[in-house]
Image (tube, rainbow, N blue to C red):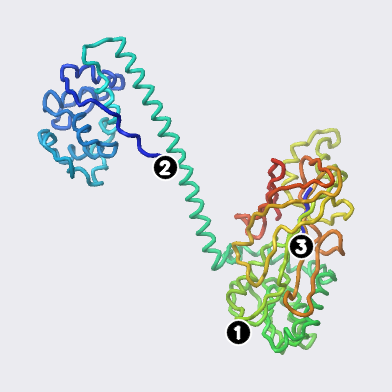
Amino acid sequence: CFMLTDGDGAADEMPELSDEEDNEEDEEQWQWMEEDSQPVTCLFCHRSLSSVAATLQHCTAEHQVNLVDVIRKHSLDDYGYIKMINFIRSTKCDASCLTGLPDAPLPWESEDFLRPVLQDDPLLQTDPEELCSSEGSCPSSGPNPHDALLQRAQAAEERARRSEEAMARAMDDLHKLKLLAQGLVLNAETSKSGNLGAVAELREDEDEAYFSSYGHYGIHEEMLKDKVRTESYRDFMYRNPEVFREKVVLDVGCGTGILSMFAARAGAKKVIAVDQSEIIYQAMDIVRSNQLEDKITLIKGRIEDIKLPVEKVDIIISEWMGYFLLFESMLDSVLYARDLYLADGGSVYPDLCNISLAAVGDTQKHQERIAFWDDVYGFNMGCMKKAVVPEAVVEVVKAETLISESTVIQTFDCNSVCLSELEFASDFCLKITNTTECTVSNTHADTTLVKYRTVSVMFSTGPQVTKTHWKQTVFLLEKPVSVQAGEELKGKITVRKNKKDPRSLLVTFDVQDRKQTYSLQ
């Protein structure tokens, strides 16, 4: 397993065709069109004829105009032919006006003549190329049924070939349009998220479940008792008092207010603490109990919805990290606050965070979670694997089950990263250290506070150090992958927000021709 630690073809050319006229052969010229005959209204009178072929013969005999000659003379393509038919029908012009037309410009060049005058006009459903091909291919030495049949078959085969080519071009164009549409949508979303983002656009009622979960005291007790987490923030602020002295600090998602109080004790002139959950009321009591109400102002609400009592702040501090670092998308809110309130030269802490990946070989865990479904009290429940595998698991990974070196798949600088970069794809290469079965991939996060100061503080949520409440995020493989010590296991990871719930994540692994998407929610 893996572990994560926090339309374009050119138009067909008009074939070389003879301009020879032979009105005596008209009946055979249009014979091929009689099979799909339907009533057609003449272009120059009100007579209704039995087919397109009969109509063309009628126009030649009664109105002394050969439409095929007109098509050839002016090299009309499909659009030109359609415009000509609609021009004749809409203007009710005399047939004689077609015989004396100049080479250019033609009277039907306007795009308005692409609009049909008659609904389901059979003449508009006829391919001008086929008209010309049919007339040009007619033998001049008299009818020969066998040759005529062969020519018709060849013409049909050629039409089928051209139709297949046109269909291929159409499918290619459709694919290009699909990609274009996707690009436009993604660009629109990126542009939109550059201002607000999917989380900021959630209504308060849509986001209620998230903030309600932080109204329970148990989760705050767990975080406060996480010494790796809490002491890292404390040490960072207490060891760097010059960073906070006389500064205005914004604490995004303050919870019980512990980070705000650290900042106040470190010398901040003013601290503004913001949280939407009900825990803010306990935070107010805590601040008063510690006589810090003159320095710390607490505001209930989402940072995206409220207005701060100051225009700019010097420092933004937040404990925004979730499982897999990005789960719950609280970093979105920190970046929103940064872009709106951080003064020039200000800083966001933590500075740097990265996500690391490692391979795990834990056959016992695989047996308990995946193979288990093959025999459940004598019943085959193997179909459950399709539902179980896509669910990412947050748990502590035993260090001895690691079978590869850890590799960083993404790094975020909180002072410069933009929202669109929180969704990403990254190639990875894991150097295998044990010959075994890879059953899981897992991730952890490494967080650095104070990148450019004299006293830096860094903590990790990896399996080889003191465990934290973040643990590791585990992605189970349905079928283990055999690996050899010294080999490199290459793949690709793609991370994106769940469009239905932007606080949850979809993580896709592509390894050894296997592709699996996991949800973290």
Q: Nearer the viewer, residue 7 or 92?
A: 7
Give residue 269's position: percent from left, percent from top: 70, 88
Q: Residues within 10 Å of mark 2 (few under 14, many from 20)?
A: few
Query: Alpha-carbon distance for marks 2 and 3?
Result: 47 Å
Which of the two discs, 2 and 1, sits closer to the camera? 2
Q: Amino acid at mark 3?
A: Ala
Residue 424 placement, left or right of 69: right
Q: Amino acid at mark 2?
A: Asp
Q: Residue at x 15, y 20 (%)?
A: 23
Residue 285 can be seen, yes or no: no
List the single residue furthest toward the right: 400
Label 3 vs 1, first from the N-terminus: 1
Position of the C terminus, as image quadrant, is bottom right
Q: Which mark is residue 8?
A: 2
Secondary structure under badge 3? strand
Picture quadrant where residue 40 is located: top left
Query: Alpha-carbon distance for marks 3 and 1?
Result: 33 Å
Residue 242 placement, left or right of 340: right
Give residue 159's position: percent from left, percent from top: 36, 26
Q: Residue at x 23, y 43 (%)?
A: 113
Query: Alpha-carbon distance for marks 2 and 1?
Result: 56 Å
The residue identified by callout 1 is: 310
Q: Residues within 10 Å of mark 3 (few under 14, many from 20)?
A: many
Q: Nearer the viewer, residue 219 or 74?
A: 74
Q: Which mark is residue 205?
A: none
The residue identified by callout 3 is: 445
Give residue 54's position: percent from left, percent from top: 21, 22
